[in-house]
Amino acid sequence: MLRLNKLHKIFNYGKVNENHVLKDINLHVPKGDFITIIGSNGAGKSTLLNLVAGVFFPEAGTVEINGEEVTAWPVYKRAPLVGRVFQDPLQGTAAEMTIEENLSLAVKRGQTRGLKLGLNKERRTEFRRLLALLELGLENRLECPVKLLSGGQRQALTLLMATIGDPQLLLLDEYTAALDPKTAKQIIAITDRIVTQHHLTVLMVTHDLKQALAMGNRTIMMDRGEIILDLKGKEREQITVNDLLAKFAARSGRELTDDRILLNR
Amino acid sequence: MWLNILQGTIEQGLAFSLLALGVYLPFRILDFPDLTVEGSFPLGASVTAVLIINGVNPFLATLLAFFAGMLAGMLTGIINTKLKITGLLAGILTMTSLYSINLRIMGRSNIPLLRETTILTVIKSWGLPERYVSLIVFTLLVLVVKFLLDYFLATEIGMALRATGDSPIMIQSLGGNTDHLKILGLGLANGLVAFSGALTCQYQGFTDVGMGIGMIVIGLASVIIGEVVIRTSKIIFATLGVVIGSIIYRLAIAIALQLGFAPTDLKIVTALLVILALGAPTLRNFMIQDEFAERLMERSVPDAQIK
Ligand SMILES: Nc1ncnc2c1ncn2[C@@H]1O[C@H](COP(=O)(O)OP(=O)(O)O)[C@@H](O)[C@H]1O
Ligand SMILES: [Mg+2]
């Protein structure tokens, strides 16, 4: 499904502030895998997701999605394959536009947009049905501008939009970090439901170690631009947050540092 | 007498409301401060004037003016998106080039159209009452343009255009090519501006190469007045507000003239109006802070009252 070969990302190449952020990343993600990604601050987790989405291009190496090499494709061209939810709830939706207008943008994911009206009766009915699945009451507020929604509601809407139009791969970058714990929990539950229903392949960055082990079927740990641990199967089932911390210290030679990391062992 | 002035003022407001819509689109929908307007307005007028004095059908001339303006706007978009030059500078570059281009098109700095065939003289010959021709034609044209624009902004492309200004990262992640959308939006906006220039020159009976100066501020003033009159997040009311804002702006200018302002001072009056309107929220904050500080000084408000 997703294959990263010998991927390097270097910011400000050849300048004094050159920063080699990803170093020879090799990763193969079979269809249906749900990978949680953890690591210290600045390890390159977001950069990795941005390379998969096409926000940045690598200095070396290739990105393959569904057997197709997409290394040089910009974000909009990868959109039919990739859905994204951002850390900042404000980024995933257009604030001045209504809920139904936002959804209608998602319906045309990766397709040519024409001079047909973006909204019609069938679409509205469909949107109401989809929104009802979120169980947030948004199905009755189709014409409400998105700027009036709470962070959690906006993130739920973004999640819905990110999975409309049949993308294969879902990228989640600390997308519950800005939410209060209760809302975060709700969003996680919705994610689980949608991912199972659409058989999505997922890359999810999180700073919640417990969540990293609880969700998905595979966990990778990053440090200073490298993948230092790739956990799956039996080994992953038995591991605890404490083991994870010990492993990090052993592999990287230091403690896992990130003031936002949640240890709740 | 003043009824005549009123009618003339409304006619001007209508002709300029297309310009105001062409300013509204980049500024409010695309979040792109586009200065191309200062060049595309006289571009529309010069193209129309030259075609008309060479015997081209005035309707065709007006349509071609629209397309010329569209090209100018697209040029600004291309300079901005493909060459990564900031939007403000991209607009200034196109506007500056257009000054030379407009002079080339006209061959001189002023073309009178007084005895030429314009869309207004043609429609008058269809039997409309002479006194009301401009009013009727402009009203109909503005309504048609407004509704077409409303419709366009509700289509799939139009919505992607709105999202480009609102949340570019989001629309890209949904497959929208924001570069192309921006180029399209700027093209459309400047097409409207040139259309406005085309109508204005036929209405006033001449084209002057300097007629674009200050147009951006006039457009902005109209947009802002419209927003004060109609507060809304719905496009159809917002565009209506822009049209009404343009008419109110013309009325304000007419009143200023009646009060004895020199016509040459109107541009600074307009600029001050825009500064006041855009700066009002900040000024109000200062005033509230000052007032509160004074209250603290005078009465030494007990802590519990400070929220
Ligand atoms: N657009 C950018 N330009 C320059 N440096 C960047 C950019 N984005 C990220 N970086 C740098 O790359 C490194 C990794 O960042 P990031 O991938 O955001 O880390 P993480 O998400 O793991 O915390 C950091 O040192 C950061 O400063
Ligand atoms: Mg990050």
Image: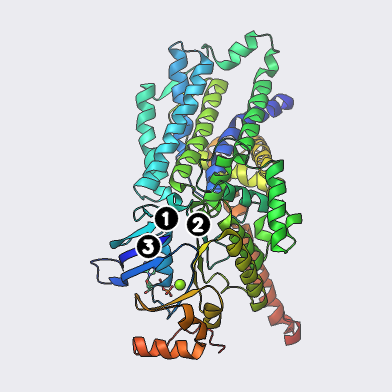
Please identify the quadrant where the N terminus of chain A is shown.
Answer: bottom left
Q: Are marks 3 and 1 on the same chain?
A: yes
Give, as a three-letter code, the residue at label 1: Asn
Q: CA distance from mark 1 to mark 2?
A: 9 Å
Q: Nearer the viewer, residue B6 or B71?
A: B71
Q: Which mark is residue B177?
A: none
Residue drawn 69% across and 16% down?
Answer: B131
What is the chain letter for disc 2?
Answer: A
Q: Is residue B235 visible?
A: yes
Q: Quadrant of residue A52?
A: bottom left
| Circles 1 and 2 in contact, beta carbons < 8 Å | yes
1 or 2: tag closer to the N-terminus: 1
The kind of secondary structure element at disc 1 is loop
Q: Quadrant of residue B202?
A: top right
Disc 1: which residue: A66
2 or 3: tag closer to the N-terminus: 3
What is the chain letter for disc 1?
Answer: A
Q: CA distance from mark 3 to mark 1?
A: 8 Å
Residue drawn 39% across and 39% down?
Answer: B94
Disc 2: which residue: A168
Disc 3: which residue: A3
Q: Are marks 1 and 2 on the same chain?
A: yes
Give, as a three-letter code, the residue at label 3: Arg
Q: Is residue B89 above or below residue B295?
A: above
The kind of secondary structure element at disc 3 is strand
Q: Quadrant of residue A44?
A: bottom left
| Circles 2 and 3 in contact, beta carbons < 8 Å | no
The kind of secondary structure element at disc 2 is loop
